[in-house]
Amino acid sequence: MRLPEGCGALSGKIVQLNKSLYGLRQASREWYALLKKCLLALGFEQCMADSCVFRLVEDGEVVLILVVHVDDIFAVGTKERCDQFGKDLGEYVPVKSLGELQWYSGCYYERDREAGRLTISQETYTKELGERHGVEWGGGIPLPTTWRLWDSDVNEPSVEYPFRALIGSLLWVALLTRPDIANAVRAVARYCSEPKLIHWRAALGILGYAVRTSSFGISFQRGTVSGFSLITFADADYASRAADRRSVSGGVVMCAGGAIAWFSKTQKCVTLSTTQAEYVAMADMGKEILFLREVWRFMLPKELRPCIPLYEDNEGAIQIAKHPISNSNSKHIDVRHHFLRQLVDEKEVEIIHVASQYQHADFLTKALPERDFVFHRDYVMNLM
């Protein structure tokens, strides 16, 4: 690196570092390499699907699970085992123990031991975001069905408000704890390049709803019927994007009564029918299942059922996935979506038909009336 001014005769000269320096681009990577080396020396195993997850196995049982985010680590295990881990790691690097998990990556973790309930929320961050933009209250849904975001004058000048900053903050909330605003934020984020006044008002409406419901979070319940097994839903909104007629995929993965993963995204290809759009949405969910299956088998090898249920409300899409036939309605589908058939053939995924009114991924694909929206939101976030 080039030495800054103030280093005497060496100022401005290029020197070779003996070890990483805080603030450099590769500093975080060097820290991770050191931490990984320490954890492996303590007997931990690293997850191949997610390199930030580690486990400690003793006598064939997983006794400790670690999740790493830069230099923040939380451990899952008995209190005695977690305390011992802190002491062991402290022999390699300085460690500060903060006790039982309450705050992590901007999220608040609240435990009710008697009820067997864990709730994860971002109430503080959401309220601070509302104060920053002068929003104190909002409506009952993040994006009303009557709003037409694409219906704006192309000659209208772009707004000078901090639109991109607000969308980035809302995406952060939608990604971690609020699947109920994921579809609305996705729809508004399309216009980041040239936002109009209607888009700014829509973004403020989403923020107002988030502030109004800032106490909401995702809750997980002990003793549910499914236990720690994964349950998935996938849905699509056909040709909903007015500009290029691309459909929207939505999916949610449930565990212990609450959502652990979800997505709402515009499909990368133009589909020719509702059936094909639903099939592509199931393929998108298949990719999520592959990842979570490996992580779950690594952390909880005795809890995961061998066949993960995927609930879909389109019979035609289910038939394409279960029966590898080629006809005029399906032969044009890209091969990259057909790996879903392999998951079905290998009994990794079981596709089950569900009635449309109980398709809980529906609110991740389009704006819904308030009654339907609340029904799906309360189920996915376990607010009932």
Image (spheres, grey):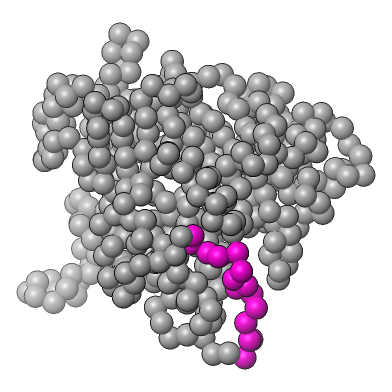
> Is residue 295 something that shows in the picture?
no
Q: From the image, which quarter does the C terminus lie in?
A: top left
* Above or below for 380 versus 89: below
Q: Position of residue 219 (x, y in %)?
A: 37, 38
* Percent coordinates x, y for residue 204 in the rendering: 43, 72
> Quadrant where the N terminus lies?
bottom left
Q: Is residue 360 left or right of residue 241?
A: left
| Span of residues in magenta | 141-155
Image point (73%, 49%), residue name: 277
Residue 322 in sight in this render: yes
Q: How many marks?
A: 0
Residue nearest the observer in this picture, 60 or 378: 378
Query: What residue lies at 74% left-to-right and 40% top-to-bottom?
Result: 314
**Residue closer to the observer: 339 or 109:** 109
Q: Is 347 situated left or right of 102 in this image?
A: right
Residue 295, quarter of the rendered image: top left
- Figure quadrant of residue 60: top left
Main secondary structure along the magenta-highlighted residues: loop
Question: Is residue 147 in the magenta section?
Answer: yes
Q: Is residue 134 part of the magenta span, yes or no?
A: no
Extreme-right residue of the structure? 328
In screen coordinates, is 8 left or right of 179? Answer: left
Between 58 and 102, the one nearer to me in the picture: 102
Q: Name the residue located 28 percent from the left edge and 19 percent from the top edge.
A: 63
Rendering coords of residue 151 (x, y %):
65, 78
Give me the residue at 46% from left, 43% from top.
378
Camera-side residue of 228 and 70? 228
Q: Is residue 225 above or below residue 9?
A: above
Which quarter of the picture shows residue 136?
A: bottom left
Instruction: Report the side of 213 relative to 368 (left or right).
Output: left
Q: Position of residue 238 (x, y in %)?
A: 73, 55
Q: Residue furthest front?
A: 371
